[in-house]
Image (cartoon, rainbow, N blue to C red):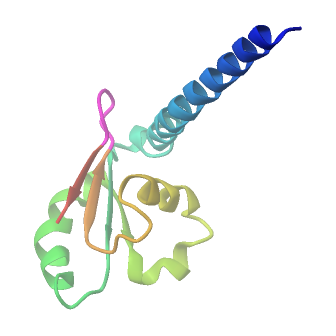
């Protein structure tokens, strides 16, 4: 094997790694979306809503927003995450995937059956 063949093998390998590195995040997000629909979509829930007990917005969220969206939402209170850590690990991963692990503001993540997942930060 000469150096030209080795160079072409290296180029092919690097191209393959680049394609995989680009496609895997999209495949992972698609898988999370499908799993959310399998877990919650059949129950009519297509929103993952996460908020906290912050004095800035807790009362407003619990009186104005939650009554409107609760029937179609999986609601997580970030301040009480120790209570649901074991049974809501998937929902936590979905939140971290779209909103970001360091995000602590109220956020609604809408999982449409077709199309892009939308993140609405309040």
Q: Is residue 116 magenta?
A: yes
Residue 93, given in percent of the width and then of the height, sits at: 51, 57
Residue 49 drawn at (x, y percent): 31, 61
Q: Residue furthest bottom?
A: 55
Q: Quadrant of residue 71?
A: bottom left
User: As displayed, is residue 64 above or below residue 43?
Assistant: below
Residue at 33 percent of width and 31 percent of height: 113
- In the displayed structure image, the side of residue 62 where residue 10 appears, left or right: right
* 9 sits left or right of 82 in the view: right
Left or right: residue 86 versus residue 102 is right
Q: Main secondary structure of the magenta part?
A: loop
Identified at 72% across, 21% down, the residue is 10
Q: Is residue 62 magenta?
A: no
Q: Quadrant of the N terminus?
A: top right
Q: Residue 122: image x %, image y %? A: 16, 66
Residue 57 quadrant: bottom left
Q: Residue at x 48, y 77 (%)?
A: 81
Q: Nearer the viewer, residue 7 or 87?
A: 7
- Which span is picked out in magenta? 111-117
Q: Can you name the residue that lies furthest to the right here?
A: 1
Residue 25 drawn above or below residue 50? above
The picture places residue 79, in percent across and down from the top left corner, at: 40, 83
Q: Looking at the picture, does residue 64 appear above or below residue 32? A: below
Q: How many marks?
A: 0
41 vs 12, nearest the viewer: 12
Snapshot quadrant of residue 104: bottom left
């Amino acid at each position: 094997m000469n150096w030209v063949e080795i160079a072409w093998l290296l180029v092919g390998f690097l191209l393959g790694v680049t394609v995989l590195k680009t496609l895997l995040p999209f495949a992972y997000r698609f898988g999370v979306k499908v799993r959310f629909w399998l877990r919650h979509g059949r129950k009519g829930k297509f929103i993952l809503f996460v908020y906290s007990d912050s004095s800035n917005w807790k009362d407003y969220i619990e009186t104005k927003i939650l009554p409107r969206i609760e029937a179609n939402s999986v609601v997580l209170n970030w301040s009480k995450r120790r209570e649901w850590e074991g049974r809501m690990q998937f929902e936590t991963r979905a939140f971290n995937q779209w909103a970001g692990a360091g995000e602590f503001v109220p956020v609604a993540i809408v999982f449409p059956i077709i199309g892009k997942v939308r993140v609405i930060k309040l």
